[in-house]
Amino acid sequence: MTTATTNGTTTTTTTTSSPKNPKKTNLLDHNSIKHLLDETVTEIVTSRGYKEDVRMSNVRLLIGAIIIVIALFAQFYNKKFPDNKNFLIGCIYVLFNGILQLIIYTKEKNAFLFTYPPSGSAYNSTGLMVSSKLPRFSDMYTLTIASADPKSISAKPTVEFTKSATKWFAKDGVLVEGLFWKDVESLISDYANAKDNKKSK
């Protein structure tokens, strides 16, 4: 609200901030639904003090870039020696691609978010590994929160929920964020309040 006085006349102007744009997706597109939910989970987790750890993503991007460079080198490098150049480059390409797939299979799996421990709790907590599943032709969304360092003495038991994604969307594809935030924050609290794996044994 702004009040101004001009020539003895007082004018009051009320200014309202524009509402937050709703998040909307195509309810017929399985990947679009999962991407929006995962993106919103990331927003919720980081708002709880967990800073995103992008080291694994950076390693994956670096290996991917190396694979692309090797492929371009094999395509455009016209020198004649060694005679088995293409074979050797192919082996290197397969090696790096194998490493990339191994990282995805063993470390990332269905994870879309890794975090550092919350600020000030590095010695009694670990970062999070957050993963999700939304099978094709199914509306059942599974969200899992686990320790990013399961071997740590501070690692907590994994928690998860499986719920129908239809409960979080209106008919026009708009995400009902209040409902979704409530469910995700409840799961985060369940993880935070769980006893440490090592201490519970």
Image (cartoon, rainbow, N blue to C red):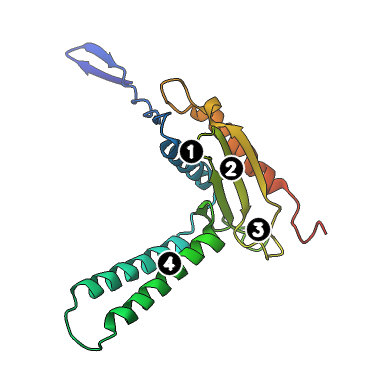
Numbered mark located on residue 125 in the image: 3
Looking at the image, tell me whether mark 2 or mark 4 is earlier in sequence order.
4
Q: How far apart are marks 2 and 1 (CA)?
A: 10 Å
Residue 37 numbered tag:
1
- How far is the residue under mark 3 from the one under mark 1? 26 Å
Q: How far apart are marks 1 and 4 (CA)?
A: 25 Å
Residue, x 53% and y 40% (percent of image)? 135
Q: Which of marks 2 and 1 is nearer the N terminus?
A: 1
Q: Mark 4 points at which residue?
A: 59
The answer to whether the residue labelled 3 contacts the one labelled 1, judged by CB atoms less than 8 Å apart, is: no
* Residue contact at pointers 2 and 1, CB within 8 angstroms: yes
User: Is disc 1 placed on a helix, strand or loop?
Assistant: helix
Q: Which amino acid does label 1 sit on?
A: Leu
Which picture quadrant has residue 140? top right
Badge nearest the viewer, 3 or 1: 1
Spatial CA span between label 2 and label 4: 24 Å
What's the mark number on residue 143? 2
Label ID, residue 195? none
Residue at image position (75%, 58%) is: 197
Disc 4 is placed on an element classified as helix
**Separation of disc 2 and disc 3 at Cα?**
20 Å
Q: Are marks 4 and 3 in contact (CB under 8 Å)?
A: no
Residue 71 in view in this figure: yes
Q: In which quarter of the image is the N terminus?
A: top left
Q: In the image, residue 35 lies at what x, y percent?
A: 44, 41
Relative to 184, is 124 above or below? Answer: below
The residue positioned 68% from the left and 59% from the top of the image is: 155
